[in-house]
Image (cartoon, coloured by chain):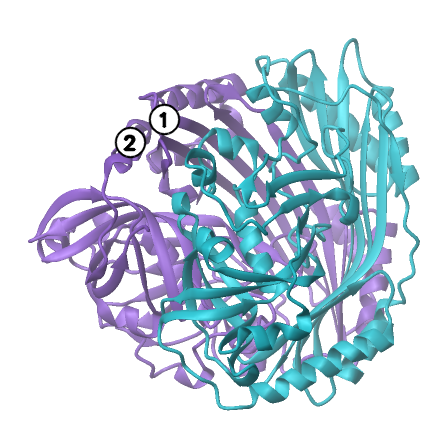
Amino acid sequence: MIDVLQERFERIAPPVEFCSLRYVDERSETIRVRQGVLEPVTTSGDAGAMITVMHRGGAGYAATSNLSEDGLRDAVERAREWARRTRGKVVDIHNLTMPASQGTYASPVEIAWESVGLPEKVDMLRRECERLKTDARIVDWEAVFWYTQTEQVLLTSGGGRVHQHFRYFVPYLSATANEGSETQSRSLKGRGGAMQGGFEIARRVGFFEAAPVLAEEALALLQAPDCPSGVMDVLLDPDQMILQIHESIGHPLELDRILGDERNYAGTSFVTMDMFGSYRYGSELLNVTYDPGNPAQYASYGFDDDGLPARREFIIRDGILERPLGGAASQARSSLPGVANARACSWNRPPIDRMANLNLEPGISTLDEMIAATERGVYMKTNNSWSIDDSRNKFQFGCEWGRMIENGRLAHVVKSPNYRGISASFWRNLKMVGRPETVEYLGTPYCGKGEPNQAVRVGHASPSCLFHEVDIFGGV
Amino acid sequence: MHTYFYELADFLNARLRGDEVFTCRFSGEDSDFVRFNGNAVRHAIHVTQSSLRMELIEGRRHARADVTLSGDQDMDHARLVGVMEQLREQVAHVPEDPFLLYNSEVRSTERHAPNRLPPPAHAVEEIIAQGAGTDLVGILACGGIFKGFANSLGQRNWMSSYSHNFDWSLYHVRDKAVKSDYAGFTWDSVQFNRKMTAAKHQLKILARTPRTLTPGRYRVYLSPVALSSFLEMLAWGGFGMKDHRTRQTPLIRMVEEDARLHPSITVLENTREGVAADFQDEGFIKPDIVPIIEKGAFRGCLTSPRSAQEYGVPTNGASESEQPESVDMSGGSLEQDDVLKALGTGLYVNNLWYLNFSDRPACRITGMTRFATFWVEGGEIVAPINVMRFDETVYRVLGDNLVALTAERDLLLDSYTYTNRSTSSGRLPGALVEDFAFTL
């Protein structure tokens, strides 16, 4: 198919300053067992191409699922028409030189999804689903496998050809317990157990061990008191840290937000362009990298969707802000250095600045040391509530599970643990950072942004972290 | 696309074997999206796409597949034959599904809308001309949206609509902006000009020195758009049969403890007056109206066919997600012209942002103010405010602390474009609320 597309592209490419064809073929399979009953197995196949034309100060895009030569030619004409119509009216990108890279990338796979038959997969899900139902008060429970493989090709008029093949796997478990009007849920990493690879990912994210623990914790939450209110320390596990990184570091550092593209929808940023290179974002323990090369991480790739080669970069080093998350177009518009993070959710949307893998680098503390260093605080796990202002500053996050820390020891379980803060000051209260043993590689399939809207996959790796003097509270 | 979809349905029908049954849902669009920043075009995109969700059923065993269509008949026929074989293979390996339910009573319907839209470039010219001298940001989405259903029992349903939705803001500085929206089925330059003029007027107020409020309780007016943010949260697991039976609904206290909202609160799924299709994926036709909350009391759930079978109740044509697509909230008696006077001193909230549950069983919701939110004194707008975080239960906002609902209601067309353009809508009043809690 790739060679056929290349031949067609060469025949239909118009005489313009820049033209590209980005082909995406995505196939997925979802298998869900809820309360012991297999729900309809759902497969999907979605293939199409986006044509981009840039010429004489105009730019146009046209997406089509008709990949015949006639279909692609029609898309070229529509993209050219928009490029003609927008001449002199587009946001200034005169400094932009589009990449023309050549290369390949493929997700590493140990156990191919296809090597395990459907009946065997269903049996595994049934078994784990059964292990979630430990008590009459467990009122809903499910086990899910979601596998996706994506083949992408980017062809450019400058001779670029990038071929990437991704495989994504998201195993999921959840248990909901109820008594009267009290309902509490626990889930496997809050849907954050998302990685690249094959069936081996299920074991890697603890899918086969988690069920009894999740059920037990959901039941314990029914009896637990509300999380107390007050200013105290908070110890966050990786499955909450990924949300904290995502919302209050990732989004505010996206360069297209800083340049104003997102102001009508996802919002602006409290970060301004003059802050890069000098602004203290967090304590000296805060080190954040953009790392697209971590093989099994959810948003790893060799090239972004504009064809820019991807490589690891420090975004924040020793607490100081170094560079934004911006691809080729944003770098040209801002004259700032960036990273290869122009990404599109599929063939029918243009690439915009996204996070990809954004990781908090490990520190030197063990989990026991962080607990021992806390006089009074709350240990929180698994995000279940997220809200932040449009400048990505004032936030409030909640978790499924909490446990008090008193005088350096873990104490009783608390329900509805929430905390709020301001990004600009919160990270400066980062007190201890977990050692590499506490790091988990997680991600989310649903990072929403852009107009037209796009939901993309994002990866985050983080150790457990301890924050000092945080405004914590519980339920009503 | 209408004829093409029906031809594909006939093609599939001719390839069934034995007792096999199929259902399929069609979804298509022929859209232009033009994104603006700084009153200039950031992206101009044309998207032609269509897809089928096919379900192959044999007895009580079934499997489903989503497949993108190319629009080229030979390619699509080959693709669908492949998908059918794959589904047959899966159906052979799956157990019987006790909760399978599809419509077996043929009810064909068609709703065709005329295309009265101008070429999108015409709207772009007008937007840039009207926005001259402003920092305009936003998205114009326009073109045709097509939905269909077919099954092997002979049922055929079709809905087409041609609309535009220009969702935009005018920025003063930083996060200070006026948000507006111009949606409809024709492009009326006079109406658009009126909206632009109103936005520019509000922009002048945003130039005043903003106030920073201390956390506490304030009297607020929530515009229909702001109130719709609360309804969106309730729709997220609040109204569905499955969420009620599994005790995950945030309205559980209305069910378990007979908690009530204010007697003036009535919420319906009003398909008759909405813009979404009146059929759903399993072929059931939606009733004109499904009452959800009536006079402050919980009245009934949205029930998908699957939930209907699982819990032994009738379906009311809800989608699989059991979320409303045409939500309707009754108005009250407060005249729009009297809102500022009735507010007296407090906040006039045009938009809320990023809501989420902070205590789901208590139906407590947190979120932010956004865009043009003003401090009002003595019934007069005084100044914009810097963004504030709220944290409140719906039982207070739409219950004990609700002062009044406006008599006028706004029709709000959903501007979401994840995967494809949404056809959801809402018709809501504004709400005057006292002691609304701001926390940060």
Coordinates of residue A462 in the picture (x, y in percent): 31, 54
Q: Answer few, some or many: residues within 10 Å of disc 2's Cα (few below 14, many 20 plus, some between 14 and 19).
A: many
Above/below status of A208 relative to A228 = above
Q: Quadrant of residue A330?
A: bottom right
The reply to whether dot 2 and dot 1 touch (C-beta < 8 Å) is: yes
Q: Which residue is mark 1?
A: A138
Q: Which chain contains the residue that carries disc 2?
A: A
Q: Secondary structure at mark 2?
A: helix
Q: Amino acid at mark 2?
A: Leu
Q: Amino acid at mark 1?
A: Ile
- Left or right: A169 with respect to B170? left
**Colour chain A is painted in:** purple
Q: In the picture, one chain is cyan; tell me its letter.
A: B
**What residue lies at 78% left-to-right and 26% top-to-bottom?**
B81
Above/below status of A375 relative to B55 = below
Q: What's the mark number on residue B132?
A: none
